[in-house]
Structure formats: structure tokens, C-alpha cells
Image (cartoon, helix red, strand yellow):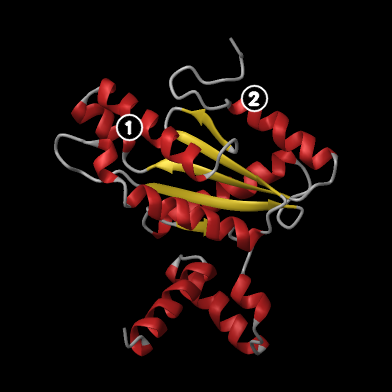
Amino acid sequence: MNKHIDSLTGLPSRKALENFLEDNIKKDNPVALALIDVDHFMEINHELGSDTGDKVLQTLAELFREAVPSQAFRVSGDEFAVALPGATLEQAFLKMEALRVKIEQSQERFGLEDHRDVTITVGVAQYPRDAKNEQSLNRAASAALMTAKEIGRNQVALAPNEEMIMKSCYYPSSAVRKLKTLAEQLNKKESFLLREALNDLLRKYDQN
């Protein structure tokens, strides 16, 4: 038996993920890391039983294998990861958003008796854009995951220091300072306020 294979899901384990990331980073190969939490899994486990919880994890593993073959790992408990060698941050984000939607649209595969939905929350970071080694890549992806949870779960987020819109657009320094001040006053992240403003803009002009 391969000691780096998780017995419940059949996915490679945390150690296999660590080895994979270390190997790619040692060779200076770009690699994206997505950390994944199952939303409200403790409630499923407590209210529907551990057997049902195990079935949810096994079904998720099947869906991960279908979407990202050979690149999904079970880190621990209800925590999974996906490693995407050669992927840019943008490519990784889109891949994980497609995975999130796939899970959301596959509720019949879980067959929960109370028909509750099973969803995932994902944080994405990329080497060398967000980190210089395996440990800092994990920290950046973990920070991204926390951001996604703060926003409301069932979504994908990037590391908090990665402002893709801010880096691709021009903003007067006075506007950036006002954004920082507002974020501090509201005790929210600047990226959260930007995302909120973008959503308002899309709702205002979306004719579909």
C-alpha cells in the first residue's frame, strides 16, 4: 500500500502534496496551489452521521478526479488541495471556479437525505507570483481561503495581497488612499470593497 495515499478517498495525501510542490519549486517550475474546504462539513457530519460525512468526502474525491486528474490531494479531514503545475494565477482561478460550479451542479451525486447542498470554498495562490517556497505558497493559499470564507463561502478567492484589478488599471493615488482609509474604518479588506463595488457595477449595467 502506498503510504502517501489517503485510505478513505484514494487521493494522494498531504505528504504527497508537499513532495509535489517542493519538487516543482526546486526546479523553478511555476505551480499554482488551491486549498479547498467543504462548506459546513461539521454540521453534515454531526447532523447526518459520520457515514454520510465519509460518503460526501468520497463523492467529492470522485468529482475532483474527474475535473483535475492526478492533481487533487486530501490534506486532512474536510480539507483538500489541487496543485496545477505550469498554471498562471488567472488560469488556476478559472480552473477552480469551474470546479466549484461542477460541485454546485452535482448535488444528486451526494444524495443527502435532507437535500442540503454540498459546496466548496477555495483559496488560490501561485509560485513564484505569491511565494518563494513551498511554505509561503501554503500560507498565501491559506490566506486566500480565509478571504473566501469571510466573503461568504461557496466561492474562489485569491491571496489578499493580489489585486488583479488594481494592477491592471490606473487609479489616482488619492483614490487608493481613500480606499485604504475606508477599508480600515469598516474593518474590511480592500479587495472585499473592490469586489463589492464591481458586483454593484455589474448589477447596474447587466441587461441579461
Q: Secondary structure at mark 1?
A: helix
The picture places residue 129, in percent across and down from the top left corner, at 74, 58
Three-letter code, disc 1:
Val
Q: Quadrant of residue 63?
A: top left
* Residue shown at the point (27%, 21%) measured from the top left: 51
Label 2 neighbour load within 10 Å: few <14, some 14-19, many 20+: some
> Looking at this view, is 176 or 88 the one in front?
88
Q: Position of residue 21 (x, y in %)?
A: 71, 37
Q: Residues within 10 Å of mark 1 (few under 14, many from 20)?
A: many
Image height of 150 relative to 36, above or below: below
For the residues labelled 2 and 1, the Cα–Cα distance comes to: 23 Å
Question: Label 2 is placed on what type of residue?
Answer: Lys
Question: Where residue 20 sits: x, y (%)?
Answer: 71, 33
Of 2 and 148, nearer the camera is 2
Quadrant where the image shows the N terminus: top right
Quadrant, the C terminus: bottom left
Q: Secondary structure at mark 2?
A: helix
As drawn, the residue found furthest toward the top would be 1
Q: Is residue 89 visible?
A: yes
Q: Residue furthest left?
A: 114
Residue under the image location 22 percent in, 36 percent down: 111
Of the numbered discs in the image, which one, if any, rests on residue 15? Answer: 2
Q: Quadrant of residue 94?
A: bottom right
131 above or below 161? Answer: above
Q: Which mark is residue 56?
A: 1
The residue closer to the viewer here, 4 or 179, is 4
Q: Are marks 2 and 1 in contact (CB under 8 Å)?
A: no
Q: Earlier in the sequence, mark 2 or mark 1?
A: 2
Which disc is residue 104 wearing? Answer: none
Which one is in front in this view, the residue at disc 2 or the one at disc 1? 1
Horizontal placement of 108 versus 200: left or right? left
